[in-house]
Amino acid sequence: MDHHLPLHHHHHIRYERMFPYLWAYTAVLALAGFCLDSPEDICRGLITIIFSEDSLITDYILIAGPGAALVNSALVTAISICLLYLAEDRLNGMTLVVIGLMSGFSLFGKNFVNIWPILLGTWLYTRYRKEPFGPYANIGLMATALAPVVSYISLDNGWGNPFWGTLVGVTIGFILPPLSTYTYRIQNGMNLYNIGFACGLVAYICVPLMGSLGASPTTHYQWASGYNEVFSLMLFIFCGTLIVVGLFFAGRPVWASWAGYRRLLQTSGRAPSDYLRMFGPAPVLINTGVNGLIGMCFILAIGGDLNGPTLGGILTIMGFSAFGKHVGNILPVMAGVALGGLVMHWSLNDCAVQLACLFCTTLAPISGYFGWPYGVLAGFLHSSVVLYTSSPVAGLNLYNNGFSGGLVAIVLYPTILAIARRRKPVFQDEDYFEHLEHDEPLVPPVPDELTEDEET
């Protein structure tokens, strides 16, 4: 293919062509930022972002302005792309997930300073294990869900300092690879935000420890509103472009792209479902655009706000469109959260619930694997669990929905299997890192294929 590449590039380079597109995405984020604010405001905003404690929910659009929030997102995305490039990571569907997560969460909670200690910790773990950094780069980036811990300890006047903040960040980055490998197996591919679950467990140990040492982190509700028009226009153009490119400019006939997308809709989405390797770029682009529009319309329909956190949620859904989420398996779970809004004592347009409406899609595989009624049930349960899981960790785990999604998945999966399917629940036996290291094509599994043991 490319014969002039150096020898260490002998591995597959199927998706190396993604880099220019990822850089284009970064440029779009930065450009959008400079369209919304002046350079002086952006610089001032970036300083505000670096010195904020960042626990949930700290909307950078509110505290620093939309320009600075988007430029911070562009910077974090650029750091992520450089890291993946330097680590010689195999690019696949998971890469798109990571870019979606990093760009989304850097609108609330991650910034271009507080992610470094955690990344350093993961790199040190690979040195300690004498393994290449490549397969771990994704884990390190996703582990930055705990970046608010770094900010909080570094900035908390009279309690922590930057040295301790950095040290704790390095420790978190060091322990997350082995922990996430383990938590992946317990959840049996039913919770897509595996790292969010692992980070939640760490936060549940870390925050009480900090409290015992005299800290008192608290959850925040810094939530911007009034940006619906400008952001819905931007999202509409962005998602529309992705769909058009997927249909007409992805190097396949329109009917083939559409047929691929139709096939994608028949999968359960159970992790690992690398849609990029199963179906190629065209169906994934269509899926990403469609899912982004669904997320946006859902927020607007419930009278919510398009701001840092909800845009982060929408970008996360778009990232996972390459790895497990599609309209067929996310809508039932979202409907479950909406149903919760009718009978519970909270309202659908509460800040935390708007986030739950988007991030509940972590449980999409339950809906895809067991059928939509179970998806509705999962969303219904998740909508309440998530409102209580952030308090004990004081909002310091940004992927709080991943944590509560994991709890729901761990309870629902064996229960549904044993009762409704009369099968014996077994642990997922494949290794978490195994599928991060490949980019060759995959054959999509047969829909509804069950791998669980028959009960004897």
Image (cartoon, helix red, strand yellow):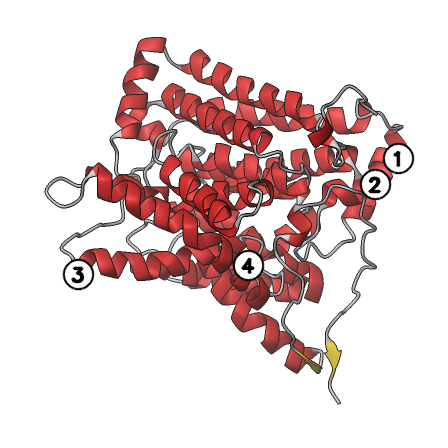
Choose the circle earlier in sequence order: 4 or 3.
Answer: 4
Q: Disc 1, disc 2: CB below 8 Å?
A: yes
Query: Looking at the image, which is closer to me, 197 or 181?
Result: 181
The quadrant of the picture occupied by the C terminus is: bottom right
Choose the circle earlier in sequence order: 1 or 3.
Answer: 3
Tag 3: amino acid = Ser
Which residue position holds label 2?
260
Query: Looking at the image, which is closer to me, 80 or 7?
Result: 7
Choose the circle earlier in sequence order: 4 or 1.
Answer: 4
Query: Looking at the image, which is closer to me, 291 or 183?
Result: 183
What's the distance in space between the residues labelled 4 and 3, CA to CA? 29 Å
- Give the vertical position of 284 relative to 242 (above or below): below
Q: Secondary structure at mark 4?
A: helix
Tag 4: amino acid = Thr
Tag 1: amino acid = Ala
Q: Neighbour class for label 2 at 10 Å: few (<14), some, many (≥20)?
A: some
Tag 2: amino acid = Gly
Q: Position of residue 85 (x, y in %)?
A: 59, 29
At 36% from the left and 39% from the top, the residue drawn is 117
